[in-house]
């Protein structure tokens, strides 16, 4: 799994994280390490572009819930967008669409972390 995590120039105080590959046990650990380290730099909200996540296991679900629980006390928000059908189904079945602010577009994800 590769992860990029850069400040979102269109949404103040927000990181844009893009995991590429499988969000499984090793991928979830890499994702957590990459994103949580950035939260120490002041910006507390995170938008995750899920469009390049091919497979997501329970470890992937767990790391996203962990991230939500981490940003909230910092005054931040988490939102996801770009989920493929299989990943979207996981969030729906687990009833996590609202908790994780799963959005159809980056624009809506930005609105969710800004409000």
Image: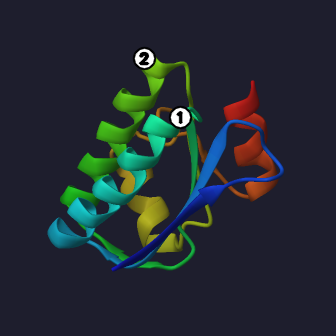
Tell me: residue 76, above or below residue 57.
above
Residue on which disc 2 sits? 73
Q: Position of residue 79 (x, y in %)?
A: 58, 44
Label 2: which secondary element: helix
Q: Is residue 83 visible?
A: yes
Q: Quadrant of residue 17?
A: bottom right
Residue 24, which numbered label? Answer: none
Counting residues from the N terminus, which is met first, the one under dot 1 or under dot 2?
Answer: 2
Q: Sort mark 1 into few (<14), some (14-19) or many (20+) by Cα contacts within 10 Å.
A: few
Identity of the residue drawn at 20% across and 57% down: 58
The C terminus is located in which quarter? top right
| Most distant residue in the left direction | 25
Residue on which disc 1 sits? 98
Tell me: residue 32, above or below residue 77.
below
Q: Is residue 49 visible?
A: no
Identity of the residue drawn at 29% across and 38% down: 66
Identity of the residue drawn at 56% across and 31% down: 77
- Camera-side mark, 1 or 2: 2
Q: Sort mark 2 into few (<14), some (14-19) or many (20+) by Cα contacts within 10 Å.
A: few
**Front one among 74 and 54:** 74
Identity of the residue drawn at 42% across and 72% down: 86
Position of 93 with respect to 76 (left or right) is left
Q: Position of residue 3 (x, y in %)?
A: 44, 72
Position of 95 with respect to 105 (left or right) is left
């Amino acid at each position: 799994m590769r992860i990029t995590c850069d400040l979102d120039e269109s949404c103040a105080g927000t990181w844009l994280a893009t995991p590429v590959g499988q969000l499984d046990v090793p991928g979830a650990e890499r994702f957590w390490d990459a994103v949580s380290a950035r939260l120490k730099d002041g910006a507390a909200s995170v938008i995750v572009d899920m469009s390049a996540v091919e497979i997501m296991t329970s470890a992937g679900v767990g790391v996203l819930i962990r991230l939500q629980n981490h940003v909230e006390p910092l005054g931040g928000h988490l939102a996801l967008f770009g989920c493929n059908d299989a990943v979207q189904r996981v969030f729906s079945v687990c009833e996590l669409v609202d908790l994780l602010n799963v959005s159809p577009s980056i624009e809506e994800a930005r609105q969710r972390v800004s409000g």
